[in-house]
Image (cartoon, helix red, strand yellow):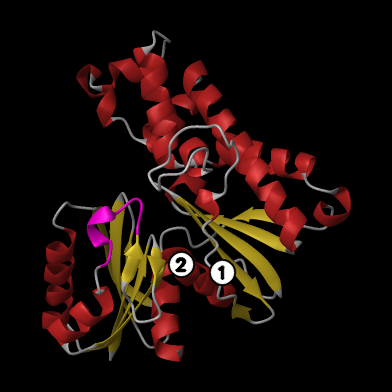
Amino acid sequence: MFYLGIDIGGTNIKIALISKDYEIIKWKKFPTPNNLLEVIIDEIQEFVNENPIGTIGVGVAGIVSKEGTVIESPNIPSLNKVPLASILQDKFSIETVVENDATVATIGEANFGEGRGFHRFILLTLGTGIGGGFYYNGRILDIPMEVGHMTINYQGKLCSCGNLGCLEVYASGRAIKESLIEKIENGESSQASSLYEGSIYKITPEDIYNLALDGDNLARQILKEAGKCLGAAMASLINIFAPERIILTGGLSKAKNIYLETAIIEAKKRSLEGLSSGISIVQSNLIDVGSLLGAVFLVRNK
């Protein structure tokens, strides 16, 4: 018997076949399409045709009800109000649990990753958007932890959620890309203009990070500013929750040398010394698979 773990993000979808011992047998990653639900059903069908599947665990970037309905997903609006769990369960007759992606990633870290041995830690998912989970005394706290929608500039940029000045519009992958495009359009110079035959709208956060590592000043500046915003938000989390550890995961967390380094320095500088002195802020060792393992662990142990 095998299990399916699925992670639905604003940029990519990941799906994995996982054994009863939580070994990832195979997994795949592909861009999030417009016809998202249709593609997910087709992908699941391929796995079901080839393997006996016991349960399906799904993590989605957004607010999810206890019944598995996606209440709101600012970065995947096509899933808003979609009863995803019941749709998949009815289609495949396989027990399915749908939960917030940061929640399942937190479960993954607590049981298989950098959260093991800690009684109190916060996980931040850094990707197209920014999410969070809070592990406290052996369980995930049942609170939204929509960290990406913390207001860090009350007169700031408009966020996809409709609010002004959210962390996501300054420190997420989408924000980093939009910032670079805006600055190039306003006449600032970057090697990014030579990528994709000059079509800067195709550039990715990974491209920007690689340019920064190659010495592109504009790319470095944008990543440092995003890192400072993330660090300011982490300082607030430290001052409120006093975690033992903050774990950073998601595709953008791979930008360790500039973005994460700046964020960690800023968080330590801005948080109260008595709360931050013993805290560790680390990069996940399960960046690509933590949410998949966590989703399966959740559905098997609910």
**Where residue 124 appears, x then y in whole percent?**
55, 56
- In the displayed structure, 4 sits above or below 245; it is below
- Badge 2 local density, few (<14 within 10 Å), some, or many (20+)? many
Distance, label 1 to label 2, CA atoms, is 8 Å
Does 198 sit left or right of 154 as displayed?
Answer: left
Tag of residue 302: none
**Where residue 1 appears, x then y in whole percent?**
28, 91
Residue 216 seen: no
CB atoms of marks 1 and 2 within 8 Å: yes
* Residue occupying image coordinates x 46% and y 42%: 172
Residue 249 seen: yes
Q: Secondary structure at mark 2?
A: helix
Tag of residue 113: 1
* Residue occupying image coordinates x 35% and y 82%: 67
Q: From the image, give the main secondary structure of the stretch colored magenta.
A: loop
Indicate the quadrant where residue 138 lies: bottom right
- In the displayed structure, 285 sits above or below 221; it is below
Q: Secondary structure at mark 1?
A: loop
What number of labels is visible? 2
Does 230 sit left or right of 87 as displayed?
Answer: right
Indicate the quadrant where residue 248 lies: bottom right
First reached walking from the N terminus: tag 1 or tag 2: 1
Residue 78 falls within the magenta-colored stretch: yes
Q: Amino acid at mark 1?
A: Gly
Indicate the quadrant where residue 261 lies: top right
Magenta region, residue range: 73-81
Which residue, given by chain and number where applicable, does mark 2 sit on? 290
* Residue occupying image coordinates x 45% and y 89%: 302
The residue closer to the viewer here, 158 or 53, is: 158
Residue lying at the far right in this picture: please name it.
274
